[in-house]
Amino acid sequence: MAALEGEYLGLKVYIDETDRENHTFFGFCGQHEVRLQQCVSCGLKRFPPTTACPFCAHGESTWEVVGGRGTVYSYGEVHHAIQPAFRTHSPYALLLVELDEQRGEPGDYDGLRIQGNLATPDGELAPPELVSSVGIGTRVKVVFRDIGSGIAIPMWSIDDEVEQPEQPWRYAIE
Amino acid sequence: MSGEIEADSPRYLRGKYAIVGVGETEYTRGSGCTTRALGTRAVRAAIEDAGLTPGDVDGMLSYSFNDSTPSPAIAGDLGMRLDFHMDVYGGGSSIEALVGIAIGVIEAGMCKTVVIYRAMNGFSQVRIGGTGRGRGSAMSGNGLFSRGIGMVSAAQMFCHSFMRHMYDYGTTPEQVAHVKAIHSEHASNNPKAYYSKRTTVDEVLASRMIVKPLHLLDCCVETDNGTAIVVTCIDRARDCRHTPAVIQSVVGRCLKPRSDMHYQSGPISTVAGRYAREILWPNAGVGPEDIEMTGSYDAFTFTTMMQLEDYGFCKKGEGGDYVSSGIMRLGGARPNNTSGGHLCEGYTHGINMVIENVRQLRHDVDDGCPVGTNGKRRHTYDYCEGGCRQVEGVELSANLGWGTPGMGSAMVMARGS
């Protein structure tokens, strides 16, 4: 197993093989699959990748495929980018996506929530007109942006294969 | 909530320790000196304020994001030989936690009096608001979940909690903007404040968007400053110069579930104060209804509101009504951040809000009121611009410190005798 190396927005990416959980997660992304750890003891899936189960502390897990579809649970819009790499892409959307799997488990308000950017279907950071069209409730699906050999990052695009809410909830001031 | 409180029980170390000295440098953008100099000046000022000499203080604590100068250098500059010191990593929510640690090490007999400081060139050197620290180094796996998606600053990291609060409870931008407007009124009566001009709700909403839902004026100022407080036991406190601010209860860096990534655990519009309050109020023997003034951390307008709500100052979801009602304005029933806080006075990762409450509990806050022949200000309680900012007769205050939506600290202080 070798380190995963890539480059994204001019930033170098290097995931050492000793960071086993992230190495595995982003390696599966490289195969265009979202796989999350599922605890062999309590059976709950988890995100982000961790060494032990946050629900029962068990150390062993298997990597299971999830559908890569979900709902925008919350969002932010960055109009003042700090990182030079993102300045030319402002405004960009920060999404907190709740996956369809394991919603409301183990607690009523818990879920598998992945943070990521809104993207076009081909994995480019979304242009302003797309950014201003999403809100809480928007249905999204994962798209993968290849950033090196065997490594990709998950991004989220508006899911055009499912019914969307009539009007997603958005901040009161546009 | 007060039904759960055992007000007569001698809970832990309630009433046995006090803050006896406070000090700070000027709040500037461009200190023109090192954090070593800022820390040394603030520590010296706090010790002098207590009526002590550096040789009377044998313990030192500090906190930073590795953007400060450690205790041994500051102590050396002031000729202090320490029996205890520790420099911890962290920003917001550290100060209340460190007061608890100071109490613990004094109680353990490791030292007798502890000075705690935060020294930072928060504007001219390391801007917490984002400098692209780590820029140039390769992104790791964890970095792909933060730097790789443009989620590195506090505004970028906290926006999901803030936005979801508006969704869950109907909180409006106008309501939240009142936090800045009110703190700016307070700052206009604070000669030390970096921003002393009054700001309106409309001006907040008209300021440019940084990270939706945060306008520029929803975000705190970044400044250069050194700040310090002195903690000792109540018996020694009585020998110090001022009326002590007696510590009734402290909670340190209390966490929400799933601190590896707190958004996994909901509701995400609830913050760590929801858990911290279960320690804070029973240990203090009082409830939020007894508190006469608050120092709710205002890195952003939202942080003040969400904490006041989760500590029980209003019902969950009614934080927008609370902060826009006028209750937390000087002259209101429970003023908040009477110095102007982080939004206006200066950015210190929480310690200036503790300093302010200590001065308030002494009934000698440093506003523009005339100083009497006894050296104390004769407060007018006229809160007009440039006027008084002393809360009349205040006996009990609470500080609510924020690290992240998932991490908070808190402290209750009472006016000593």
Image (spheres, coloured by chain):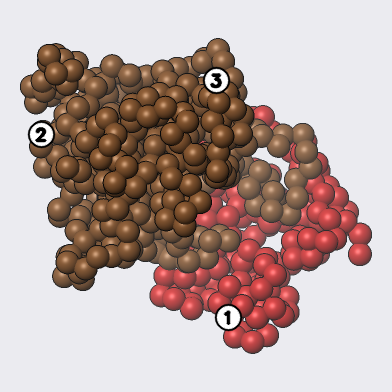
Name the residue: 48% across, 78% down: A106
Task: Tell me residue A37's x, y (percent).
Answer: 68, 74
Direction from residue B368 to residue A125 in the image, left or right: right
A98 or B77: nearer the eye? B77
Front of the two marks 3 and 1: 3
Circle 2 Cα neighbour tier, 10 Å, few/some/many (<14 / 14–19 / ≥20):
some
Circle 3 Cα neighbour tier, 10 Å, few/some/many (<14 / 14–19 / ≥20):
many
Residue position marked by numbered label 1 in the rendering: A56
Task: Tell me residue B412's x, y (percent).
Answer: 27, 50
The residue marked by circle 2 belongs to what chain?
A: B
Is the same chain shared between marks 2 and 3?
yes
B110 or B360: nearer the eye? B110
Secondary structure, mark 3, is helix
Asked if B266 appears above or below B90 in the picture, the reply is below
Q: Residue A40: in sight, yes or no?
A: yes
Is the same chain shared between marks 3 and 1?
no
The residue marked by circle 1 belongs to what chain?
A: A
User: Where's the C terminus of chain B, which quadrant?
Assistant: top left
Name the residue: 22% across, 36% down: B243
Asked if B168 appears above or below A56 in the picture, the reply is above
Chain A takes which shade in the image? red
Residue position marked by numbered label 3 in the rendering: B37
Residue position marked by numbered label 2 in the rendering: B392
Direction from residue B231 to residue B119 in the image, left or right: right
What separation in Å lies between label 1 and label 2 (alpha carbons)? Answer: 52 Å
User: Where's the N terminus of chain B, which quadrant?
Assistant: bottom left
Task: Tell me residue B84's x, y (percent).
Answer: 55, 45
Which chain gets the brown colouring?
A: B
Name the residue: 55% across, 38% down: B82
Q: Identity of the amino acid at label 3?
A: Ala
